Image (cartoon, rainbow, N blue to C red):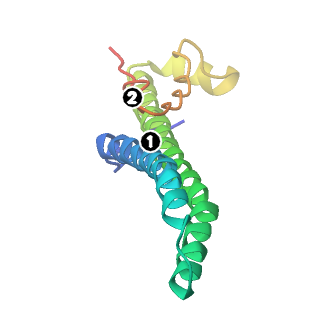
Amino acid sequence: MHGDRSDVQFDYERALCLARRLWALADQVDQTMRSRQGLTIAARKDFTGTYADQFAQRVDEEVTGGPGVAQALRRDAQLCAGGWKQAMDEENRHLYGRHIDHLKKQRNVLESLWDGAFGYRGFPPEPDPVPLPQPPLFLPTAHFVTYP
């Protein structure tokens, strides 16, 4: 394994901020739909004619389409959190590889020959995968790995 000298270019903070915002918008869509149901029942009570039919059609479209919008927003929030996790895992692999390169440079010729013949030994384990941030707060679940 060789360390990648570049860092992963990703806005970690903004990704989780966007996930939180999308989740909040989904909650807002759900809340708005619930609050409008009572209002539309009252509005449709004695409403007749062409405009009443158009109103009823729009209300029905909102009732059938609203949950899909909220689900899509929540799915997008999860995708943002998943992107954060993938970027964190990748950056931790880069940092691990750089650390291994540093350790290899400190080994003498005999250790290097031994490692070449029988495999590397004495290196720290690879970093564990980062847990996925959970809704609705989408708080960071890990930090970058550090090595002495």
Cα distance in 3D space between marks 2 and 1: 9 Å
Task: Using a 10 Å C-alpha cutoff, classify the residue at mark 2 as few (fewer than 14 neighbours), some (14 to 19) or many (20 or more).
Answer: some
Residue nearest the viewer, comparing 116 with 60: 60
Instruction: Give the side of residue 25 with respect to residue 44, left or right.
Output: left
* Badge 2 element: loop
- The mark nearer the N terminus, 2 or 1, is 1
**Disc 2 residue type (three-letter):** Pro
Q: Residue furthest bottom?
A: 50
Residue wearing tag 1: 84
Q: Give the residue at the far right of this rendering.
A: 118
Residue shown at 55% from the left, 23% from the top = 126
- Looking at the rendering, in which quadrant would you find the N terminus? top right
Q: Mark 2 points at which residue?
A: 140
Q: Residue 12 location, x and y as percent?
A: 34, 41
Above or below for 43 versus 50: above
* Quadrant housing residue 3: top left
Residue 73, can we see it?
A: no
Mark on residue 10? none
Instruction: State the SS at label 1.
Output: helix
| Tags 2 and 1 touching, CB below 8 Å | yes
| Quadrant occupied by the C terminus | top left
Q: Considering depth in this image, is 134 or 32 the residue closer to the camera? A: 32
Q: Which residue is drawn at 50% across and 58% down?
A: 42
